[in-house]
Image (cartoon, grey):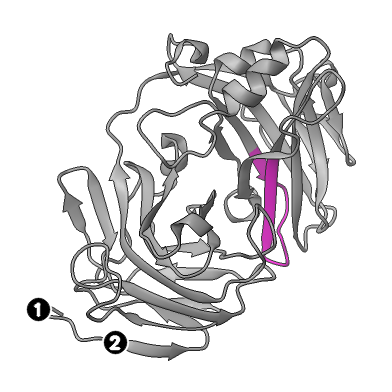
Amino acid sequence: MGGKKMKKTMWITMGLLLAAGSGFAQDEFFKIMDFEEQDPPAISASWDFFTGFSVEGEPVHGGNYSLILDITSGTGAWSFSTWQFPTEIGTVDLSNTDEINIWVNADNIFQMNFEFGGANLGYRGYNTEDLGTWKKLCWWYPEETASAFTAVNSWGSFINPAAMGGFPEGFSGTIYMDDIQARIRKETPEREYLLLNGFNSDADLANVTVHTEGGIVKNGAVAPTEGDGYLKVTLSDAGNNRFTLDLTNVPEFQNYDRIHFDLYMDGVATGYWGNFGLYLDTKDASGNPIADGFTLVNGSYSSVATQQWHTFVQQYGPVQGTTGFPMQTLMKDSIAPIYASPGASIAIRLNTNGGGVDGVPLYIDNVRLSRVKGSAVSDWDLY
């Protein structure tokens, strides 16, 4: 379809239609959808909504058209949506990118997350002060996460799925979307690694609390990713902590900026889903929370780690040159002060839930830190 585009509107029960374009802009961005020329793809959701394309006088960020998404109800109670790329775009390789940008303009506040390639990139918010204006929702991700984006043809999102983070459960209103694109990664510096725990002997449990049936497994049927052992915990459908790793006596944590760990689900989620959260707990010398329950990583173990090892990674130190990283001050405000305060504590813990995973073993191995080679994070300008 070329030339001037006619306005299109469709009432939707289970699907959403989008229009899109693709290509490179100034060798810096890969254009995914700009709502100008391509035919729209179906996107599935159980919300009560309809969508169309803007007409003269309605908000447009770039070009002549934007997408209109009118939602009446249904986004709450963790109602998921899947956004399929149009046929003309098909499946694309985004492994050389480091950001996803979506421009939005709305008449009500909301937060939405962005998921693809087995990664949950987290939530970004459209707040009261943003109402009626264009705002760029930006998700930055490291090269290890992008390495799974070699064949992307859709993404998934929740919009106000529950009352959390200052946002209500459920969204009702109009959202305009425009100029969805991925930024091309400029460089990939060499990194150096520090092993936190390889779970190779009982001595490796000295700073670990296992909250379920499990422990160190050696000479198991599954080969470890490091050393000769790994940690076993037991999954359940209910959300519960599986293990906690105390980092109070690991001051090196403040001189690195990424955490990596390998997961393996030794079974199948018969309910077809299984998620995890890796949380950071910090307390001052009096036991008062500083960043207690801070989410470092959210992800799906069932989608990428079913009967195979998969490496998850999360940046927790500052990142240069992006507005899409919400943890820029986490190191300075919540981590470094712990190591300068006798009696304070810091730990990470893994919490999981799922569907049809009761009693299924989950293995963890090779928990490690990394940083740009030869440069401690405390030396960086953003620290």
Q: Which amino acid does label 2 sit on?
A: Lys
Q: Which residue is drawn at 80% across and 53% down?
A: 239
Residue to which mark 1 is pinned? 3
Q: Residue at x 78, y 63 (%)?
A: 356
Q: Residue 8 carries which label?
A: 2
Count every numbered label the image shows and give the total: 2
Residue 375 picture location, percent across and down:
44, 11
In the rendered image, the vertical position of residue 273 relative to residue 26, given as above or below = below
Q: Which of 152 and 255 is in front in this view?
A: 255
Task: In the displayed orientation, state which residue is furthest to the left.
Answer: 3
Q: Which of 89 and 136 is in front in this view?
A: 136
Task: In the displayed orientation, state which residue is furthest to the bottom.
Answer: 11
Label 2, label 1: how far apart the Cα atoms are? 15 Å
In the rendered image, the vertical position of residue 236 relative to residue 330, given as above or below = below
Does the magenta portion include 276? yes
**Element at label 1:** loop
Residue 382 picture location, percent across and down:
45, 21
**On-image quarter of the N terminus:** bottom left
The answer to whether residue 42 shows anywhere in this view is no
**Quick one: label 2, few (<14), some, or many (20+) residues within 10 Å?**
some
**Element at label 2:** loop
Residue 264 quadrant: top right
In the rendered image, the vertical position of residue 344 relative to residue 350, given as above or below = above
Does the magenta portion include 246? no
The answer to whether residue 56 shows anywhere in this view is yes
Q: In the displayed structure, does residue 353 sit left or right of residue 180? A: right
Residue 141 picture location, percent across and down:
45, 40
The part of the chain drawn in magenta is: 263-278
Q: What residue type is labelled 1?
A: Gly
Residue 236 picture location, percent across and down:
83, 54
